[in-house]
Amino acid sequence: MTAVRSVAAAVSELGGTFGGELLRPADPCYEEARRVHNGLIDKRPAVIMRCRSTVDVTEAITLTRQLGLEVAVRGGGHNVAGRATIDGGVMIDLAPMKTIEVDPEKRTVRAQGGVTWGELNRETQRHGLAVTGGVVSSTGIAGLTLGGGLGWLMGKHGLALDNLRSVELVSAQGEVMCASEHEQPDLFWAIRGGGGNFGVATMFEYQLHSVGPTVTSGLIAHPFDRARDVLSFFRENTAGLPDEHVLFGTLAHAPDGSGMKLAAMVTCHCGPQAMGEKAVLPLKRFASPVLDTVAPTSYCEFNGMLDAGYPKGAFNYWKSTFLKELSDEAIDTMIACFARCPSPMAQLLLEHIHGAATRIGIDETAFPHRAMGYNFLVLSQWKDPRETDRCIGWARETYAQMQPFAAQGRYVNYLDDDEPDDPVAAAYGPNYRRLQQVKAKYDPKNFFRMNQNIRPVP
């Protein structure tokens, strides 16, 4: 009871100056505010501090340190492992921080840490500009960018983190810092891939590019019994894509809710419309698709096309790894595993990486995965809690079956919490030691550890 009274007293005292909203378990809005995108995560913070400004974030960190509690930081709340929330600690919630400032002449945008990709794209596309963002528009810009940022524009413009010009963040000591190539360059290197290990990122500045407003994009799906042909065709086409063209492959279920299994490709060509229409012709002419939505589409509309397939509150359990190659054996294994898939919401996804994202040196940013190839994702998703064991079991079994084809390295944004070894070390590879040293400099006591944690080592 002493700890509860201590939290209550401290929150009450801060309430008079805090510019955001303070929520405790008894407050009416607490239950909704504590929930993150993944319904499998069910944690109860002692207090949720919904910040509206950088000053609010500094006060939240100060309060957390005074109380001796652990802290979690929420941006968009999409992290599948649930690192955006915490039991019995403080959740610093950036969701109210929605400021977006576009400079169309300099082709830059500044956006606060609570902004989602849908919100950012809406503002930048008013000027025919965009930056590589998430493939689901409700994803927050903060977490996705700090951990990497695979997206539809990465072939032409690199990952989300490759387009960062600067980041404002609040340190574990409550100090507001700016990291860029000219200010705190070691920190700027580390946050481009190092996630939330070094502070609370309150403002991002991105370089923008001319995109759209129309792109050639959409989904093409074939019957599941043609899956081997479809994935072989996908492999052949990804071997020679131009930078403007990004192509993902998937074994998924029909979007109409029928549960029908499909083999599909999702594509986006961000170049001129005539080039885009020519580039997607081989996809459209291949075999006899049962669904073809590939057409000139606004970039904003396409960026939200997959949102309905990832509803908030659904249960999610993901496993992923990079592949050495998409061999015939790997394709056959994927097909056999997906045939046993227990949920009509689950899928297997192949995210192809090429172009500008692969032309940056391994040590230029903390994100080391710069080889052309595929990130393989087992995306298990369901709604009935009675199916939890089956759906998690299927994901684990599928991941294990694909291990013979796995390459070294992991994508930190997809890491889960049940890894037997140290997946964080695998995620950063040759950059891990340097990241540990930067962590020791800026967060030596590991205050920010509710993340894919980089342990400080001098």
Image (cartoon, rainbow, N blue to C red):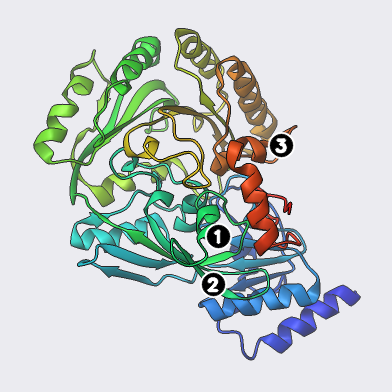
- Compared to 305, does 50 lie above or below? below
Residue visible at 69% across and 62% down in the picture = 443
Tell me the residue that label 3 is attached to: 422
Residue visible at 64% across and 20% down in the picture = 400
Tell me the residue that label 1 is attached to: 187
Verify CB contact (< 8 Å) between mark 2 and mark 1.
yes
- Compared to 299, does 10 lie above or below? below
Residue type for callout 2: Met
Residue type for callout 1: Leu
Q: CA distance from mark 2 to mark 1?
A: 10 Å
- Compared to 431, does 139 lie above or below? below
* Image side of residue 368 versus residue 128, left or right: right
- Of mark 3 and mark 1, the one earlier in the sequence is 1
Residue visible at 62% across and 29% down in the picture = 391
Element carrying mark 2: strand
- Of mark 3 and mark 2, the one earlier in the sequence is 2
User: Percent x, y for residue 280?
Assistant: 19, 27
User: Percent x, y for residue 180?
Assistant: 45, 63
Q: Which mark is residue 177?
A: 2
